[in-house]
Image (tube, rainbow, N blue to C red):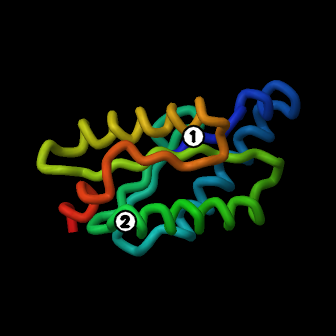
Amino acid sequence: MIDLDHFKRINDTLGHAAGDAVLARFGRTLSAEVRVGDTSCRLGGEEFVVVAAGMDEGGARELVDRIRAAWVEAAPHPVTFSAGLAPITASGGTPALLAADRALYRAKRCGRDRTEVEASASRFEAQR
């Protein structure tokens, strides 16, 4: 799960058209960086979700790093993002989404512009 940091400031200072441009550009950046067959979508507001099937924790971190590097180059205005990673287990997508959300909010509490993981690497490995 990914959330654009301090996105409200863009809307408040530059206007909603600028905010819409940021969201659209971020969506295009996600689409360009995820693998064919993976899913990226806007969850709502300035939150996005990427489902990367069969990827371990290291691969997920590399994906987020690649997205972050591409975003630095593509962003129409300076705006960072925070990310939360969690594996999809036998419990399904809803618990994974809730776990990723917890990790995301921990990333925000720890200073933003960072990635946090909710589950251990061994749980990611178990999903391969």
Which of 31 and 85 lies nearest the eye of the viewer? 85
| Element at label 1 | strand
Q: Is residue 116 left or right of residue 90?
A: right
Q: Residue at x 38, y 59 (%)?
A: 39
Percent across and percent down for residue 73 are 77, 65
Q: Position of residue 54 (x, y in %)?
A: 27, 68
Residue located at (21% from left, 69% from top): 128
Secondary structure beneath dot 2 equals loop
Residue that protrudes farthest toward the bottom in the picture:
36
Query: Dot 2: few (<14), some (14–19), or many (≥20) neighbours within 10 Å?
Result: few
Report the Cα–Cα distance between label 2 and label 1: 18 Å
Please name the residue shown 57% across and 40% down the image.
Answer: 3
- Answer with the quarter of the image where residue 16 lies: top right
Q: Residue at x 66, y 46 (%)?
A: 113
Task: Please name the residue that numbered disc 2 is placed on.
Answer: 38
Can you say whether 2 is above or below 45 in the image? below
The part of the image, by quadrant, that contains residue 75 is bottom right
Tag in front: 2 or 1 = 1
Amino acid carrying label 1: it is Asp
Q: Which residue is mark 1?
A: 3
**Dot 1, how many residues are within 10 Å of its Cα: few (below 14), some (14-19), or many (20+)?**
many
Whether residue 85 is visible here, answered yes or no, is yes
- Residue 68, position as x, y percentages in the image: 64, 60
Residue 4 in percent (x, y) is at 64, 41
Please report whichever mark, 2 or 1, sits nearer to the chain's N-terminal start: 1
Q: Residue flagged by tag 2: what amino acid is it?
A: Asp
